[in-house]
Amino acid sequence: MKTTQNMTTGSPVRHIILFSIPMMIGNIIQQFYNLADSIVVGRVVGRTALGAIGATGSVTFLFFALCNGIGSGGGVITSQYFGRDDKKKVKRCIFNVALIMLIFPLIVGAAAFFLSRPLLILLDTPETMLPDAVTYMQMMSIGLVFVSLYNYISSMLRALGDSMTPLMFLIFASLVNIGLDITFVKFLGLGVLGAALATLISQFLSGVLCLLFAIRTNPYFHLEKKDMRYDRKVVKDSLRLGIPLSLQFSMIAVSCMALQRVVNGFGDIAVTAFTATSRIEQVIHQPYQTLSAALSTYSGQNYGANKKDRVIEGYRKSLLIMAIFTLIMIPVLQFFGEDIVSLFLTDEPEVIRTGAIALRISSLFYLFLGVIYVARGVLSGIGDAFFALLNGIVEVIGRFTIPLFLTAIPMIGMWGIWWSVGIVWFVSGLTAWLRYVQKMRELTGKKLIPDKAAVR
């Protein structure tokens, strides 16, 4: 199996699509095994337990974001060195980013475990859901180190052009998770705790096995003693990009927490419907997210090789791919919303109706969501740390203010939750596009990285 892929020559569309396909399959599978928790819990235990899992989503995302942003920054730096064909630096990246990704999850996971209850109370989580929500979040905090391990290996392999290996282990983990979900929740009656344990075990297996496989098959993971040294520049560059990404993801998570608090104020039907629609839209996000990640690797490698025109061409072709997908998905959500939401609950017609209307509202804004991801992919690949902060600030301001304003209007009320999501996507998409235009103007007529200079 091919363990690297050089994207600095050949058709940009071919590279992006071939690299995206395994990632998209993997990301969708990952979301489906997240959905498995919700579907099994919702059908077996009931809507209160399902809402409890959903109530933890924004808080858990906050702590995951703090770790995964660092790994993403390391992946960008690795892809740039790979594009320059600097094998020594690539190996140094693999080792030094591993050190970072060992320390961060342990610290953040411990903090998340002890802050679970206070944060969920702060978000005004309904009392009926609070005990299960605390249990689920604490278990996810323990599993943070396993999630970070898998994401670290994935980001390194994808920086080298290998999107197939992470897919194989995601498929394995997904099958394990679904099997354990059914066993723990349905047959052993462990409820939310069982769903959390199933996720924890599957994440552990995917991370460890993926690492062992990479060490065995990928030559860049064959580290010698000279490669396993602290490299101040690699760590500095990884943190220079990773910290803004972590802050961006964290600010988005905080903004989601603010939105979750608004949702919680409308009662358990709104919370459960929001949980269902959020899980569905996590799946919808995956093709956009996959395209963004592929574009980031593609842009990073070409940035490292000083091939400016290929970066711009990749962006334009990716916009077209994104637009085609969006035009396919909008009618699906408009006409089949009830059928999709009913996957989670069988005897809750009010929740199903609410979720279906919500999907019709938010799907109107998918094009702007796609623009965010495409612009983010290019800007991350070329190392634009400022955009990460800018995007995070825009989302925080939008999610803190727009939902409060819209839900206060009597004729809109609860539906302002989902209208606000779409409006934030619109504003963020416009901001991302303007930042892309600005960066491309700065880069026009000059090399992306000066010859013989280190990647910055």
Image (spheres, grey):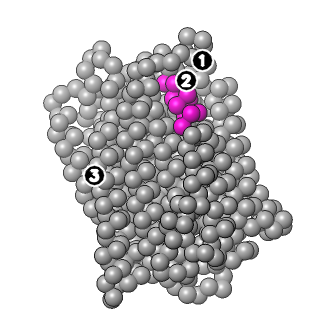
Q: Amino acid at mark 2?
A: Phe
What quarter of the picture does the C terminus occupy? top left
- Start-end of magenta stretch: 93-104
Residue in the image at 32% along x and 35% along y: 382
Q: Secondary structure at mark 3?
A: helix
Q: Where does the image place residue 351, in percent across and percent down from the top left?
A: 56, 83
Nearer to us: label 1 or label 2 = 2
Q: Nearer the viewer, residue 102 or 444?
A: 102
For residue 446, side relative to residue 251 (left or right): left
Q: Is disc 1 surrounded by few (<14), some (14 to 19) or many (20+) residues within 10 Å? A: some
Q: Secondary structure at mark 2?
A: helix
Under mark 3, the amino acid is Ala
Magenta span contains residue 362 = no
Q: Identify the mark at residue 223; answer none if there is no mark.
A: 1
Quadrant of the rendered image containing residue 46: bottom right
Say if residue 275 shows up in the picture.
no
Residue contact between numbered discs 1 and 2, judged by CB atoms under 8 Å: yes
Neighbourhood count class around disc 3 (C-alpha, 10 Å): few under 14, some 14–19, many 20 upward = many
Q: Is residue 21 above or below residue 241?
A: below
Residue drawn at x 34%, y 24% is 455
Earlier sequence position, callout 1 versus callout 2: 2
Mark 3–mark 1 distance (CA, rounded to whole Å): 38 Å
Label 1's element?
A: loop
Please determine whether, in this image, residue 236 is positioned above or below residue 407. Answer: above
- From the image, give the main secondary structure of the stretch colored magenta: helix
Q: Say the numbered circle drawn on residue 432.
A: 3
**Quadrant housing the N terminus:** top right
Report the front residue among 445 and 188. Answer: 188
- Pointer 2: what residue? 95
